[in-house]
Image (tube, coloured by chain):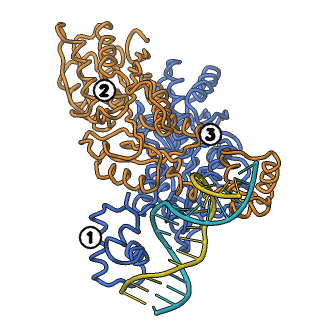
Chain colours: A blue, B orange, C cyan, D yellow
Amino acid sequence: MANIRDVAQKAGVSVATVSRYLNNKGYISEEAKRVISAAIQELDYRPSLVARSLNTKQAMFIGLIVPDIVNPFFPELARAVEDVALAYDYTIVLCNSDEKIEKEIHYLNTLQQKYVSGFIVAASQADASHYTNLNVPIVAIDRRIHPSIPIVATDNREGARMGTEHLLQNGCRRLLCMKGPAGLGPADDRFSGFMDAVEGKDIEIEIVECPFQFEASEEVARTVLRQRSIDGIFASSDISAAGAMKAAYSLGITVPDQLQIVGYDGTKLSSQLTPSLTTVAQDLYRIGALASRMVIKLIEGQELEEHEIQIPAELVIRETTRSGA
Amino acid sequence: MANIRDVAQKAGVSVATVSRYLNNKGYISEEAKRVISAAIQELDYRPSLVARSLNTKQAMFIGLIVPDIVNPFFPELARAVEDVALAYDYTIVLCNSDEKIEKEIHYLNTLQQKYVSGFIVAASQADASHYTNLNVPIVAIDRRIHPSIPIVATDNREGARMGTEHLLQNGCRRLLCMKGPAGLGPADDRFSGFMDAVEGKDIEIEIVECPFQFEASEEVARTVLRQRSIDGIFASSDISAAGAMKAAYSLGITVPDQLQIVGYDGTKLSSQLTPSLTTVAQDLYRIGALASRMVIKLIEGQELEEHEIQIPAELVIRETTRSGA
DNA sequence: ATGAAAGCGCTAACAC
DNA sequence: GTGTTAGCGCTTTCAT
């Protein structure tokens, strides 16, 4: 591989001039531009981004830390993050944390040693101290980390309220709320939203906690559905809703006739299920894209107009609730 | 941030000794180890991996190029790749190619400039010249790139044969084959497997091509199901099968009573559908893990025992075919 | 067993 | 406008 010195030599200029040319910095004569460009062509020269990073302390990488890319919630986010990163010449380092704080810390450290330019993180619920004193920009996505850290997310409480309300309007009177893990911000908020909707009304409610995981959710739903007569389920994620659908099916309960179900997230999964799932959709792509744009601004030293971006949630009515039938 | 010189100074040794300590290379006295270790602790020193890369030409990154991480096939692969990479101290750079050769080339170039150690690629169907003369190791995953490039994949033809056979054994006589995009290796192989199973038998068959994409598959399936009496569908991917299930549902065709369906891939989606999908499962995690281990061996200069690894496909019988009911 | 010093390929003062 | 040169932080001969 040719290096900058080879180029300089072949072009008959100094490395400084070549460097200026490469970075569009400082004055360069048209003539110099011409010869340098030619030399670069001829040698098929590509600058070493690593050598550059060693100077600039910027490797043009963005670390994306998510609990688990297999959870359908995250690929859509990741995709958006990558798209805008690409447009600004950054590339994405994918990190699965499994909600484990040690893994988060490991990646935070390793990637800083690699001079990543910034982080986008869907954090675990644990304490945030390892995030607050990084020396690179960071933005939170979906889950709040610390007041000092910018975030983009949806209004989970309002979203959950809407979803639950929809069930009530459709005539449900015996609701099951499949809430997410206690202590996880968005899950708690969604639960609050559920309560907002039912409070003060003459509704029977049953509340169970279950992880954002298919099998566990199915199991939990099956247990409840066997014991109690439920006519509406508000699930705190699409994946839990999918589990509930499966449970209902195995018990011979028909959806949406005997049981209506509302999910949350608006992942592709929700539209791919049969019947397709009514869900409180987050604009996942938009969230990812905004977060990505946000870190990049931070990296480039620009001001953020907003420290927190709230994306409205939207109720998407499909086939698991009656008005959609 | 402290650097190696600070450590050397504090420890009262030379940077060379510290470097040896860091890399477990060459002789170091116990005494030296002690003081260096102490100095590192005290200064909270972390070596600059970028500076190291500049010497070694190894940034300890593995580029993972996939068509689209949103396709549920790839997150499971990516997850496995990441898990084993982590165990060997590599980190994953995620690249979505959208099957576009320009994007592949862009990433190949950029990442080489960043000294990535190797690539794992689920290639687009295009010509392979830009892959064959890289100066870093590469392994293909799922899709064959070039005879010279190691690959790990399943036996798609045999898998498809098994899946189709299952339909026949369950009494299907009017089959629809939803084949994948022509020209895409695995899709072609699966189609061959389908033909292997039906050839010479008294079976009505209908063949349609559709992308590995939900909406398009649903549309195609709906069209066919409206016009013809079909009692079994072999879909070339789970996502297409999901589309078919939706189409059947909307036409009031019951699964598996009136119509049986077999998918392909064994993604999580297949088990999350209701009824759950009978599918020809690939061991996605294993494929990803093996591919990852393979590039790492290559990176470390080890011999590969096998240049091509074939993972057997496995028929997973669930609820969309009758024997599973 | 350890140190001095060259070099990896680039950027950025500073001088001309 | 352009060149010289000192780093960036590490690895690695080659001496000693």
The residue that mark 3 highlights is A98
Instruction: Give the chain of mark 2.
Output: B
Instruction: Give the chain of mark 3.
Output: A
Q: Mark 2–mark 3 contact, CB under 8 Å? A: no
Q: Position of residue B229 (x, y in %)?
A: 20, 18
Q: Nearer the viewer, mark 3 or mark 1?
A: 1
Residue in the picture at 41% in, 41% down: B137
Q: Amino acid at mark 2?
A: Ser
Q: Position of residue D7 (x, y in %)?
A: 61, 72
Determine the CA span between mark 1 and mark 2: 49 Å
Callout 3: SS: loop
How packed mark 2 is, by other alpha carbons closer than 10 Å (few <14, some 14-19, many 20 or more), is many
* Precedes in sequence: disc 3 or disc 1: 1
Q: Quadrant of the C terminus of chain A?
A: top left
Judge left or right: residue A146 versus residue B173.
right
Vertical side of A283 occupied by A69: above or below:
above
Residue in the picture at 49% in, 55% down: A287
Label 2 and label 3 in one chain: no
The residue that mark 2 highlights is B236
Q: Amino acid at mark 3?
A: Asp
Determine the CA span between mark 2 and mark 3: 31 Å
Q: Amino acid at mark 1?
A: Ala
Q: In the depicted view, which residue is nearer to us: C6 or A214?
A: C6
Label drawn at residue A38: 1
Q: In the depicted view, which residue is nearer to us: A235 or B155?
A: B155
